[in-house]
Image (cartoon, rainbow, N blue to C red):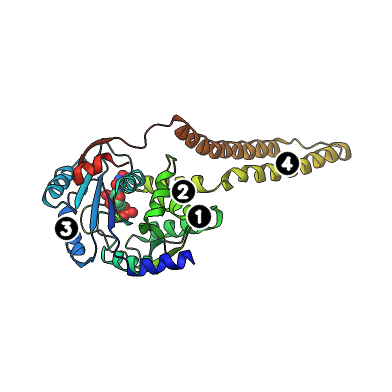
Amino acid sequence: MRSSRMNQDRAQATPELGVVIPCFDEEAVLPALFEELTRFAQALPGKVWFLLVNDGSRDRSAALLDAQCDRDPRFAALHFSRNFGHQTAVSAGLAHVRGDVVAVLDADLQDPPAVVLQMIAKWREGYDVVYGVRQNRKEGPLLRACYAAFYRVMRRVANVEIPLDAGDFSLMDRRVVDLVNAMPEHNRFVRGLRGWVGFRQTGLPYDRAARAAGEAKYGFRKLFRLALDGLVSFSSLPLRLAAWLGLFASVLGFVLMLWALVAAFVSETTPPGWASTAVIVLFFGGVQLLMLGVLGEYLGRIFDEVKGRPHFVVAHRRGWAATDAAAR
Ligand code: UDP
Ligand code: MG
């Protein structure tokens, strides 16, 4: 009853839209981005608020952002004191943005703003999260294979629904944004947190454009970290793997022990045994180190959480009355 009335309200609503855009060394695309966003704002029936999070850019991005905020009162900028990483920038944006619905886009125009209009239509149908599903990728075959493998592994092992080929590009209802903001964790895998919240979520297929200008800021190392963050934050399967390997090793060890005993009693000449000893030592040495590494991944993250440092440091703010006096 209640939800159907709410959906009816939504069907007629013109929601205020907040847009969060993380930027790291994006001076090459920012002019095109501002132009595109201004055009997009004209196509929107309701109000719109753009929040650009400058993740410690070392180029002229900061000056360009501030100039845009001064030119257009719909723009605000949050400048980090250094590079804190994409997921942190998105999280900071979500914590400070205005709006009844909030979209997250990349600065490089790979996520076309026009698709947000279709996402709002889905929100009107009653969905709380509408995430973009990449239909094609412009990356090379190696990177594409890695992405495909990662999403499929995550789907099998994660304890939340993490849809295939969906990134951060999405539209969220205000209640989802508030819930994501309320999650205290430091290692933030935004698409996982978003999925964890639940409610009604749906995918919207779109063609992912090539980067409009500049270079990708995600090197292989950063992508690998992101993948590991996702895996470790949303699955304890790697830890359980240790138990399974342990079981396997125990059974194997027991069988070998029986064999060794029988061999010692039955055959005249006990085998010299160097090869088997070496193999066993090397194999279990490797397994133990691997499992220590897995433990370390979890331990390191627990350490990050326990230290309880702030997630980011803001150097300065511009626009929307210094972003609503630093929001909440
Ligand atoms: N980004 C960021 N901090 C970083 C790396 C990237 O805020 O440390 C931003 C970047 O400016 C862009 C978005 O995250 O808006 C996605 O980055 P990129 O285009 O390099 O990644 P890809 O599209 O290759 O996944
Ligand atoms: Mg990109």
Please, what secondary structure does the residue beneath circle 1 have? helix
Marks 1/2 in contact by CB < 8 Å: the verdict is: yes
Amino acid, disc 3 = Ala
Q: CA distance from mark 2 to mark 3?
A: 32 Å
Name which quarter of the figure residue 252 lies in.
Answer: top right
Name which quarter of the figure residue 295 lies in.
Answer: top right
Of residues 192 and 49, the one drawn nearer to the viewer in this rendering: 49
Name which quarter of the figure residue 38 lies in.
Answer: bottom left
Residue highlighted by disc 1: 154
Residue highlighted by disc 2: 230
**Nearer-N-terminus badge (2/4):** 2
Amino acid, disc 4 = Ser
Residue highlighted by disc 3: 32
Q: CA distance from mark 1 to mark 3?
A: 35 Å
Q: Residue at x 39, y 69 (%)?
A: 8
Residue 89 image offset from top left, x and y in percent: 32, 45
Q: Quadrant of the C terminus?
A: top left
Residue highlighted by disc 4: 250
**Nearer-N-terminus badge (1/3):** 3
Marks 4/3 in contact by CB < 8 Å: the verdict is: no
Marks 1/3 in contact by CB < 8 Å: the verdict is: no
Amino acid, disc 1 = Met
Drawn side of residue 304 relative to residue 281, left or right: left
**Nearer-N-terminus badge (1/2):** 1
Residue 110 to residue 275: above or below? below
Q: Residue at x 82, y 41 (%)?
A: 258
